[in-house]
Image: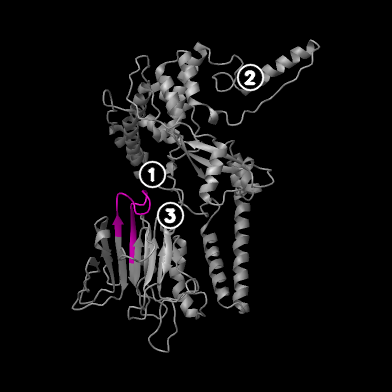
């Protein structure tokens, strides 16, 4: 029996959200009924009673959508749970519960429920639990096992490991106590969860007394995690563009808010909703990338088999550490596995060099030299993840910028309408290999959309340009924390740098507005005549040539020349929005450019990723 609690409960002061039973009592083909609980069980076929059942608490049932699934048998069933608000965070809108009761099969080393049903391949996060009637060192490390017990349990634990399931268990705590004096205490009821739900798992305990059977009730508690794994990235290289072609061409953008009721807040909501409609359509036709350390070009089925043999031999050797044959077998499997990896890397190296380009030369270098061990920040006074994040963000982005306010949309008569060719020109300058940022949509995705349906991007950006608005949805960024090479310690802020990745769609709007600001800045005299950076037609090479020419000219005249180089750290991050906007207004810059510049600089957020 498993008691499942979802939420922040410090004590078992109210009924559990879900109770999962194995081998429940059945009278005349019916399960017992309990107040405030709704029972779900497999249908009885041919007079066979159900061997598993779920009892769902009524208040919990009223907040979720529930779909029971059966497999044409009475010893296993599943519940698919959904809620639009999310169970533990807004992204976890659904998950699957699998309940099974497995007994001995026709052969002594088999069980009635196969591992493919207990550990399904599902798009939803999965929690599988039940009485599997197997014994394994992972669940009970203090027990001495027979060879046939390990042979029976290994297929189940191997499949759980291959699919990324985690065993929920306190080592050494027994849950089954035989009624007779012959059987020894053991562990039969086990629970496994996927990586996403494992992050929300908070407690495994047996606080309740025995129910009268030989099994002790187990309490599983789940709650909102303090931190989360990064979301799975879409594999945009495998996007099904033929299937998207017609839907993108037929898609339309709803009209943007206008005067007199439109505000900057309503414009931001309109933009976020419209952009999510496009990205949701792309997500339906784009598979996700594999999240595994073995998804490498050099990996093969042989390496997978050798790795499985190595892990299996390692587990067997831990059962009896004094068995010379098991220890020798484990050493042989380990040697064969790592030798095969080295051989695969040597064989892959020529192919990697043959296909190396200027864009992938650093990948080849990392493959040959290897990556240095990462340096995790250990800042004084920062003992928790929250304190560490605050310390790093305050150092990299000092000061709290003023937050954006909700204002009425203002018409700007001098604003030029956005042309489609300006969007194409902004996308042409975008790098295909740049980091996608929070939206996880690379630049080539928007380039392809611009070729298939150019009206979508234009209809999204035109109202923003016309009203001088930079929406909040484009102000979120990912901060990648990198340690600086050659730094002796990790206890200083100067040993790390933050690489900020903006959304790729935000960069399209930034390039369009930057081109307009550059033209205006030259006309009104906002640029220094010696400035070379961030200007079309001028670059660092021009600055170098100018400096060399000036030095040689003065040296030829017999003068001594000195050059002073200044590195202004964090100049952009410390720009005062009010001061900058006042300077732009004093130079009679178009009001819509001033408004966009102000909204671009304030109200930004950054999430640190290690």
Q: Earlier in the sequence, mark 2 or mark 1?
A: 1
Q: Are marks 2 and 3 in contact (CB under 8 Å)?
A: no
Label number found at residue 58: none
Residue 88 within the segment the image draws in magenta = yes
Q: Residue at x 56, y 71 (%)?
A: 313
- Left or right of 501, for residue 351: right
Q: Magenta stretch?
A: 80-98
For residue 445, above or below residue 84: above
Disc 2 vs disc 1: which is toward the camera? 2
For residue 225, above or below residue 158: above
Disc 2 vs disc 3: which is toward the camera? 3
- Measuring from the top left, give residue 470's x and y in whole percent: 40, 28
- Residue that carries the numbered disc 2 in the rendered image: 542
- Left or right of 87, for residue 535: right
Task: State the residue in front, 127 or 575.
Answer: 575
- Measuring from the top left, give residue 189's x and y in whole percent: 39, 73
Q: Earlier in the sequence, mark 2 or mark 3?
A: 3
Q: Residue at x 61, y 39 (%)?
A: 361
Label number found at residue 225: 3
Q: Are marks 1 and 3 in contact (CB under 8 Å)?
A: no
- Measuring from the top left, give residue 442's x and y in whole percent: 45, 37
For residue 551, above or below residue 200: above
Q: CA distance from mark 2 to mark 3?
A: 52 Å
- Left or right of 178, for residue 59: left
- Left or right of 258, for residue 142: right
- Residue that carries the numbered disc 1 in the rendered image: 286
Q: Residue at x 50, y 32 (%)?
A: 431
Q: CA distance from mark 2 to mark 1?
A: 44 Å
- Measuring from the top left, give residue 588's x and y in whole percent: 45, 13
Dot 3: what SS? loop
């Amino acid at each position: 029996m498993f008691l499942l609690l979802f939420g922040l409960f410090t004590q078992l002061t109210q009924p559990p959200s879900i109770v999962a039973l194995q081998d429940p009592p059945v009278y005349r083909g019916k399960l017992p009924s309990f107040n405030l609980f709704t029972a779900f069980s497999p249908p009885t076929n041919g007079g066979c009673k159900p061997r598993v059942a779920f009892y769902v608490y009524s208040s919990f049932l009223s907040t979720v959508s529930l779909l029971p699934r059966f497999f044409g048998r009475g010893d296993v069933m599943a519940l698919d749970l959904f809620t639009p608000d999310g169970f533990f965070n807004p992204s976890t809108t659904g998950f699957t519960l699998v309940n099974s009761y497995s007994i001995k099969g026709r052969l002594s080393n088999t069980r009635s429920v196969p591992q493919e049903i207990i550990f399904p391949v599902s798009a939803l996060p999965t929690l599988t639990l039940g009485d599997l009637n197997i014994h394994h060192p992972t669940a009970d490390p203090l027990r001495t096992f027979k060879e046939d017990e390990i042979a029976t349990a290994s297929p189940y634990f191997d499949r759980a490991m291959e699919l990324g399931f985690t065993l929920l268990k306190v080592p050494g705590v027994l849950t089954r106590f035989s009624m007779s004096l012959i059987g020894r205490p053991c562990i039969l009821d086990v629970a496994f969860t996927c990586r996403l739900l494992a992050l929300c798992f908070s407690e495994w305990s047996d606080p309740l007394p025995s129910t009268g059977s030989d099994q002790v009730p187990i309490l599983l508690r789940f709650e909102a995690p303090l931190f989360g794994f990064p979301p799975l990235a879409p594999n945009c290289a495998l996007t099904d563009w033929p299937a998207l072609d017609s839907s993108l061409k037929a898609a339309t953008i709803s009209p943007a808010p206008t005067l007199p009721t439109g505000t900057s807040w309503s414009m931001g909501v309109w933009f976020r909703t419209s952009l999510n409609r496009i990205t949701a359509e792309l997500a339906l036709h784009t598979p996700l990338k594999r999240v595994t350390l073995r998804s490498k070009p050099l990996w093969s089925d042989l390496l997978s088999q050798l790795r499985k043999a190595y892990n299996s031999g390692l587990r067997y050797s831990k059962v009896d550490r004094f068995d010379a044959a098991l220890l020798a077998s484990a050493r042989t499997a380990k040697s064969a596995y790592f030798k095969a990896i080295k051989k695969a890397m040597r064989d892959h190296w020529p192919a990697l060099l043959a296909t190396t380009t200027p864009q992938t030369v650093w990948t080849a270098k990392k493959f040959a030299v290897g990556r240095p061990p990462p340096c995790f920040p250990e800042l004084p006074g920062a003992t928790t993840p929250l304190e560490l994040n605050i310390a790093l963000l305050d150092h990299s982005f000092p000061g709290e910028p003023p937050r954006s306010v909700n204002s009425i949309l203002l018409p700007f008569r001098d604003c030029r309408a956005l042309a489609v060719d300006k969007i194409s020109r902004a996308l042409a300058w975008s790098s295909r290999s740049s980091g996608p940022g929070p939206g996880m949509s690379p630049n080539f995705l928007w380039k392809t959309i611009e070729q298939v349906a150019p009206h979508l991007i234009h209809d999204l950006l035109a109202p923003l340009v016309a009203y001088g608005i930079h929406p909040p949805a484009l102000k979120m960024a990912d901060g990648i924390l990198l340690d600086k090479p050659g730094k002796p310690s990790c206890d200083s802020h100067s040993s790390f740098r933050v690489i900020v990745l903006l959304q790729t769609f935000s960069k399209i709007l930034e390039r369009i507005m930057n081109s307009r600001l550059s033209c205006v800045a030259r006309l009104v005299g906002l640029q220094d005549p010696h400035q070379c950076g961030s200007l079309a037609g001028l670059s660092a090479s021009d600055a170098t040539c100018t400096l060399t020419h000036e030095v040689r000219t003065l040296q030829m005249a017999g003068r001594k020349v000195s050059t002073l180089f200044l590195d202004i750290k964090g100049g952009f991050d410390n720009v005062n929005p009010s001061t900058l906007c006042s300077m732009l207004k004093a130079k009679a810059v178009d009001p819509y450019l001033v408004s966009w510049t102000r909204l671009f600089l304030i109200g930004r957020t950054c999430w640190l990723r290690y």
